Image: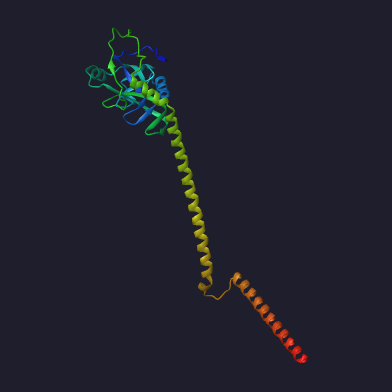
Amino acid sequence: MSNSKSFESFVDKPLGYVEGIALSVGRSLNNNIYTVDECKNVTKKLLNAPMYYEHVNATASIGRVTESDFDGYNVHYRAAIFDEEAWNRIQTGTISKVSIGFNYEYAEPVNGQLMHNLNNLELSLVALGGVKNASIAPIKVKNEHLLPPFKISESLSVEQQRAVESMADVNLRDIIANAKKKADAAAIAEKDAAIELQIRAKIAKEVELENAAKAAPSSETDGALTPRQIIRDEVRQQLNAAIIETNNQIKKRQAELSAEKEKEK
């Protein structure tokens, strides 16, 4: 189990410290899915992350995460609070939830959003959080330099163990692979459909041009012949001449045959 800690000494004295759970393996209430590996990634990057109200950043910072660790199911944190109003609301229990804000490299649609490579993390005090187990509680501190050790439980409940196993289950990888196959097939089908449309458009254009060519002679009003018409007429004349010559030869041969028969009589 890894344990990342900040050894920075505070310049301004924190009003108090809080700790709790920031993230858990499995599906969140807003349908994000976090694997064991992604929770390990968050544990490393959560250290020194700023804290805000309801994910409002910049000048609205109220604290900073000072320690983080992962028990195999939950990402635990400890943070220093510098904002008086926030510290008072935490102590009175009017705020008891936290939520991680982040950017991410990409999310796969697998009956939800399977998150990959969360980054630019921040932790916010919220009224309603997306992670069911997310929590915040003040720590009893003897003095500002003496905090109790940051300890987390190493034993998981049956429900937690099942959630961890489901994230490592081969079925999840199969679902991801199938989702990718479906996406690839959809892309190929879309490409094929586009090619078919191009072919149909080309055929329609060729038919249009052919029909226009057939209709062109009747639409001419100046009496001028196109090169194609001239060639066609010349070929027709040659064929007619050949037919006439052939007919003449046939008639001549028939006359000769008739004359020979008369002589034989």
Q: Residue at x 77, y 90 (%)?
A: 264
Colouring scheme, one of rainbow, by chain, secondary structure, one colour: rainbow
Say if 261 sits above or below 46 in the image.
below
Q: Which corner quadrant of the image does residue 161 belong to?
A: top left
Direction from residue 60 to residue 241 in the image, left or right: right
From the top left corner, tell me how far across and down residue 155 is, in percent: 36, 15
From the top left corner, tell me how far across and down residue 246 is, in percent: 69, 80
Say if 92 sits above or below 237 in the image.
above
Say if 142 sits above or below 181 in the image.
above
Q: Which corner quadrant of the image does residue 100 belong to?
A: top left
* Residue nearer the viewer, 6 or 260: 260
Q: Which corner quadrant of the image does residue 233 belong to?
A: bottom right
Which image quarter is the N terminus in?
top left
Direction from residue 225 to residue 94 in the image, left or right: left
From the top left corner, tell me how far across and down residue 176 is, in percent: 44, 33
Say if 172 sits above or below 191 in the image.
above
Residue at the front extreme, as displayed: 265
From the top left corner, tell me how far across and down residue 187 is, in percent: 47, 43
Residue 235 in view in this figure: yes
* Residue nearer the viewer, 214 or 90: 214
Q: Residue at x 45, y 36 (%)?
A: 180
Q: Residue at x 54, y 72 (%)?
A: 217
